[in-house]
Amino acid sequence: MFTDLRVYLQDIIDYTVSVIKTMAFVDYIEIFILTCLMYILIRFVRETRAAQLLKGIFIIFVVSLLLQGLDFRVLGAFGEAIINAGVVAAIVMFQPELRRILEKMGRTQIVKSLAINLDAEPYKLSSSIEQISTACVSLSRKATGALIVIERETKLGEQISTGTILNAIPSEALFQTLFCTHTPLHDGAVIVRDGLVLAAGCFLPKPQKEELISKDLGSRHRAAIGMSEVSDAIVIIVSEETGTISIAHDGVLTRGYDYAKLHKYIVAVVMPAQKKKPKYKKPEDTVESAQTKAAKSAANSRKNKAKKARNKKGGDNL
């Protein structure tokens, strides 16, 4: 049995060596690209539940190779069948991770450059950000819980469909009314799109790493983290216990914002990048100052007087 295994492994080594000898330059480039893709995949899933599933699939693959090498026909065929069905199973099991990968690909700069820009006008966004910041500070002083989602590139149609459509102009009074504990929409999230309050009372997804989140955080903070994990939205949370203002972005929760910090953060992330104005040279670099002109004029005047004096002196000598 072990002799067969040794022969099987030797055949694999001989086959690998023969393949390497016949490889062309393009093959090495292809291997390099595949290696980079595998590294990106492993780096992406190493902190998710998919990492444990990948380990299990790898163990099944190794065991299947050993069974085939030991000439266990039934068990080898069974392991091969599992591997063949593993592709479909992996797609089903890794559906959340695959979705996150595709969403991140859609948010790359190359894809954004190909998309049609339908963003709201800058002045609408500026007014909306100012009202949101003011409302959050006001709600914080009263320790009124709030959950505001500012939509960006990733559209939140699934979450919007769970709430009530408003399509209203944002204002401090509107946010205070929506998050008042006596209103039916205060438990859900408010979603802002293109500078307008599009929907309220929306349900947000759970975080993918809920077991790693501190138990001190409530349902609003957990929902905010979950929403920021599956989209590029900015989620603002006002704690109803302490009044602390927090922001969840890209799966990371940061706390302790006031009006200035909150407004600055939202503007830096949400507002479209303004084109830099061309730098103009200072007037003194291109236009002579009055003092320079006066000095040059005085020097020219002295030269002319000296020239006239020399000419007059030459005439007198004659």
Image: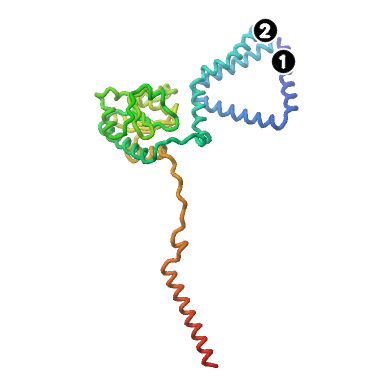
Residue 199 relative to residue 38: left or right: left
Does residue 58 show up? Answer: yes
Which quadrant is home to the N terminus? top right
**Earlier residue among tags 1 and 2:** 1
Residue 235 lies in quadrant: top left
Disc 1 residue type (three-letter): Tyr
**Picture coordinates of residue 183 (x, y %)?**
26, 24
The disc at residue 73 is 2
In the rendered image, the vertical position of residue 151 relative to residue 51, given as above or below: below
**The residue positioned farthest toward the top in the image shown:** 74
Dividing the image into 4 quarters, which one contains the C terminus?
A: bottom right
Q: Can residue 265 be seen in this view?
A: no
User: What's the residue at 49%, 32% (across, down)?
Assistant: 107
Q: Position of residue 270 (x, y in %)?
A: 41, 37
At numbered mark 1, what does the secondary structure look like: helix, strand or loop? helix
Marks 1 and 2 sit apart, C-alpha to C-alpha, by 14 Å
Q: What residue type is labelled 2?
A: Arg
- Rendered location of residue 263, percent (x, y): 35, 39
Relative to 309, 145 lies left or right: left
Judge by depth and name the residue closer to the eye, 69 or 315: 315
- Place residue 252 in its image quadrant: top left
Residue displayed at 47% across by 62% down:
286
- Compared with 79, 204 (above or below) is below
Which numbered marker is on residue 116? none
| In-front residue for pair 169/255 | 169
Which image quadrant is residue 158 in? top left
The crowding category of the residue bearing disc 2, from other C-alpha atoms within 10 Å (few below 14, some 14 to 19, many at least 20), is few
Q: Which mark is residue 8?
A: 1
Residue 139 point in image, percent of width and height: 28, 32
The total number of labels drawn is 2
Crowd band around label 1 with a 10 angstrom C-alpha radius: few (<14), some (14–19), many (20+): some
